Each structure stands twice: as structure tokens, then as C-alpha cells.
Image (cartoon, rainbow, N blue to C red):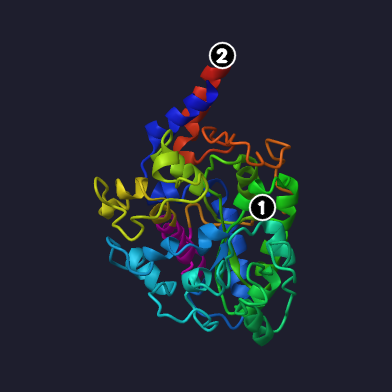
Amino acid sequence: MMNLLAVAATVAFAQNDMTQANSYDSAWVNGWVAHCRTVYTGGTGKTGGFVLQIGDSITHANPYSQWPRGGAGQTAGAGRDQDTCSWCNAASWGSGNLDTTNKNGWYLAAADTSSDRGMTASGGIDAGNYASGSGNGDPTAMPSDPTQAGAAQKVADGTTWVYNLNIATVASAFNDAQFAVVMLGTNDAKHARTPQAFLTDLTSIVTVLEGTGVVVILSTVPPSTQFDVTPFNTQIRAFAQSQGLPLIDFYLEILARQPTSWQTTLISGDGIHPTGTNSSADPYTPGGNPAADQTGTNAANDGYLLRSWLTIQKLKEVRSYVVNGVNPSPSPGPGPAPGPAAASSSSSGGGGGSGHCGCGTVPPAPAPWMAGAAGLLALMALRRR
């Protein structure tokens, strides 16, 4: 009963616009702005707008890059879609796949360094693999290399390391990056890892990136029909709040648009990856409103188009608050006290391929745009027990 009521609340109050997309971290916006400004101003030798894309096959996939680097319908004007895509160096690239001097984070993630990975994203990788540089299928671990030249050589070597990546080496190779969008957790669920082990490794990954002056933006992972991702998304949300990090909630944005049919619209037939047949289309049509940054039907039927649009909307906000010094209202104060992320709602490490996903459940700490309705409906559900 509760699952259906929560989904109904999502549908009833979803606006599917930029305000909604950027609202999931509003409860701690003062904290993340203050924290990110500290990391940002502490970085040296940085390239403006250099944003790494850190993740697994969902980040390595070329459709994730298509709308930012020239898709249809990008809004024009200062601080809007076109301007943001230009700022973060999203552009088309040629046939070369091993250019470690390229400042386009989508290129570094998507261009095939090997048959299965780019230079910052790799198919099958989980947070533990990425933190250690090992365990993703290669006989040899990718070692940590603190030197930029040596690290760049390693991440571009798709023969020795067909699958493995090491976060310390990636951070060294691209030590002039200013930001990183990090989305990991899908393969942690697939590999039946515990949410606590995932959190430990995610913490390590963020620590390494921030240690090189990279501002981290976290993203939840999409729902799956193959395993339960909800405990891992719970950890991502709680960690973002406790550490003062901005958050893209890809999971909830999928449910906002397709609460009951996401399996056939926004997630592909394998039950894991987003759909991507129309990933360079105009996200504001049909039926949306580009003047109000409100998406239409295209973004409700192509998972990679939705993800890339969400990323650009969050980068608009982060750029405004962190780079340009615009203050949210109220103006930012001290960040949250450091502390462990809240415990997962489940002690299980995922469904292990059992097919149970629990994807109709809206996790704790709902976004402000639906918190009131979800709370009311939850109370109604409790009274009916």
C-alpha cells in the first residue's frame, strides 16, 4: 500500500523542470555550497569548466554524451543549456580515443580506450574496484600513480588494463579538473556487495578527488529489474547530505516521469542500462516548456537523454553558486559537521540477480517538491494498517 501511495504522490506533484531536478539537495544547500567553495578555491592549476564523468558502463555509454555535445533544443542565454555545455567543454570529437589532454569529460568517459572502458569510466566496475584499481576483470591491478605523466599513460593503456581503473591514478592524470560527476553503485548491487562496503569505497573515492581540488557532484543510480539498488541510493543520499555534496537524483527523476512503466521507457530491455535511441533529441518536446526549463515527452522516454539533461541542470547550479559566487537563499553558512552516512534501510547487499528491485519505493528524505504529499500519504497508509 505504501509503495503505491508514495508513487502516486510523485506523479501528482512532479513538475519535471530544472527546479525539481535541482531540489534533492535543497535541505543542505548552504552546507554543500560552503563545502564546495572551499574545495574549489583550494585547487591550483585548474582548467575552467573541466568536469570529469566518473562511473561504470552507464557513464561510459556514448548516448550519455550526445545531448551535451550538440543535441537539439538546448536553451540559449547566459547560464542556460548552451552556455553551460560550452563552459564544460562538451563538444564532438574525432576518431582519436587516447587524448589525455582533452578537457571534455564526456570524451574521457565515452571514447573507447579499450573494448570496455574509457579513461574515467569502465563497464562492470563497482566502487570497490575503482577505489583499489583491481577486481574488474584484469589480471593486473592498475596501480596508484601520483605523477601526472605516468598516470596519464596508465589510463590511456587499454591493453594492460582493459577493464580496471584506479581513482588515484585517474585523479592524477586529470589533476587540472575542477569538478567530477560521480555515479557508482549499480555494479555494487549487481555484485551483492553490502551497502556499508560501498559507502566505505565511495568515501575513499570522494576523498581522493577532493584531495586534488576536485569538487564532487554525486548521482543516484537508476532503478533495475535485476537487483535492488535502493540501499545503495540511500547511502548516496545520506553521504551527500552528511559530507555537504550536491546531488543529482537520477532514480527519483525517473520515477517522477515514469512511476510504473520505467522498465519499458527509461530503462532498456536488460533491466539495467538507460534507453538511448533518442538521446540527442530535444528534451523539452513534445509538451514541455523550454522557457521554464520543463522537460517534455522525449525526456520521459529516453533514459540517457534524461540523465544528460539532469547533469547539465545541476552543473548550471553548481557553476552559479560555486564558480560565480551567487548565493542561494538564504546565503550559505557553515557546512554540515562531518559524520557517517545514515545506515541503509536494508542490510542486504542487493538482490544478487534475484529480480526483486523494490523500485516502486520512494526512499527516505524525499525531495522538497514532494515531501509534504508523501508524508501525508504515508500517514494515511499507517492508519490503514
Q: Residue at x 48, y 25 (%)?
A: 4
Quadrant in which the C terminus is drawn = top right
Q: Position of residue 177 (x, y in %)?
A: 56, 75
Q: Position of residue 35 (x, y in %)?
A: 62, 61
At numbered mark 2, what does the secondary structure look like: helix, strand or loop?
helix
The verdict on residue 122 being magenta is no
Q: Nearer the viewer, residue 88 or 291?
A: 88
* 321 relative to 334 in the view: left or right: left
Q: Position of residue 297 (x, y in %)?
A: 30, 45
35 horizontally vs 108: left or right: right
Corner quadrant of residue 353: top right
Q: Are marks 2 and 1 in contact (CB under 8 Å)?
A: no
**Vertical relation: 223 (above or below) 319:** above
The residue located at (46%, 35%) in the rendering is 370
Is residue 310 part of the magenta span, yes or no?
A: yes
Q: Nearer the viewer, residue 288 or 339?
A: 288
Q: Residues within 10 Å of mark 2 (few under 14, many from 20)?
A: few
Name the residue carrying label 1: 336
- Please identify the residue farthest to the top as the structure is shown: 384
Name the amino acid, label 1.
Pro
The dot on residue 383 is 2
Q: Amino acid at mark 2?
A: Arg
- What stretch of residues is rendered in magenta? 308-327
